[in-house]
């Protein structure tokens, strides 16, 4: 009798577990998870780009100070530059 009760409880648990896993695979759940993942990836890419821009600006300032380049010569596009 106890054995039957154990297998009945085990079957109910496995059935509930399988139903939850199948419900998680519904298209709206999959789409929501994909969209959340894409938004997270986009946020990480923005943070990375911001960090790279900050490091590049710091390195540029360091090189300008080292080579004493305080001004930037503006390139005029209407002039012929030999190319």
Image (cartoon, grey):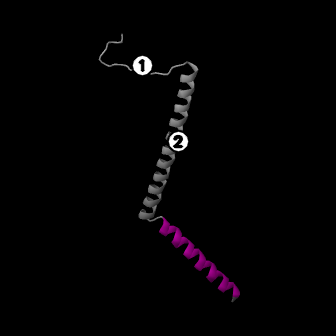
Between 46 and 23, the one nearer to me in the picture: 46
Between 25 and 68, the one nearer to me in the picture: 68
Residue 73 got which mark? 1
Q: Is residue 29 magenta?
A: no
| Residue 11 vertical position relative to residue 71 in the rendered view, above or below | below
Q: Quadrant of residue 6?
A: bottom right
Please state, as top left, top right, bottom left or bottom right, where the C terminus lies in the image: top left
- What secondary structure is the stretch in magenta mostly built from? helix
Q: Is residue 21 magenta?
A: yes
Instruction: Tell us which disc is closer to us: 2 or 1.
Output: 1
Where disc 2 sits, the SS reads helix
Please state, as top left, top right, bottom left or bottom right, where the N terminus lies in the image: bottom right
Residue pictured at 51% horizontal, 44% vertical:
47
Residue 27 pos. (x, y %): 42, 63
Residue 57 pos. (x, y %): 52, 32
- Mark 2 = which residue? 48
Between 38 and 4, the one nearer to me in the picture: 38
Residue that extends furthest to the right in the rendered view of this protein: 2
Part of the protein shown in magenta:
2-24
| Residue 9 vertical position relative to residue 83 in the rendered view, above or below | below
Q: Earlier in the sequence, mark 2 or mark 1?
A: 2
Q: Quadrant of residue 82?
A: top left
| Residue 13 vertical position relative to residue 45 in the rendered view, above or below | below
Label 1 crowd (10 A; few <14 / some 14-19 / many >=20): few
Residue 48 pos. (x, y %): 52, 42
Residue 64 got which mark? none
Residue pictured at 56% horizontal, 29% vertical:
59
Q: Is residue 76 left or right of residue 27?
A: left
Residue 13 pos. (x, y %): 60, 77
């Amino acid at each position: 009798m106890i054995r039957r009760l154990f297998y009945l409880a085990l079957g109910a648990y496995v059935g509930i577990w399988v139903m939850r896993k199948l419900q998680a695979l519904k298209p709206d759940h999959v789409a929501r998870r994909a969209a959340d993942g894409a938004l997270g990836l986009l946020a990480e890419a923005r943070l990375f780009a911001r960090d790279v821009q900050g490091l590049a600006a710091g390195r540029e300032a360091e090189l300008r100070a080292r080579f004493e380049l305080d001004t930037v010569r503006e390139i005029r596009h209407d002039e012929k530059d030999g190319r």
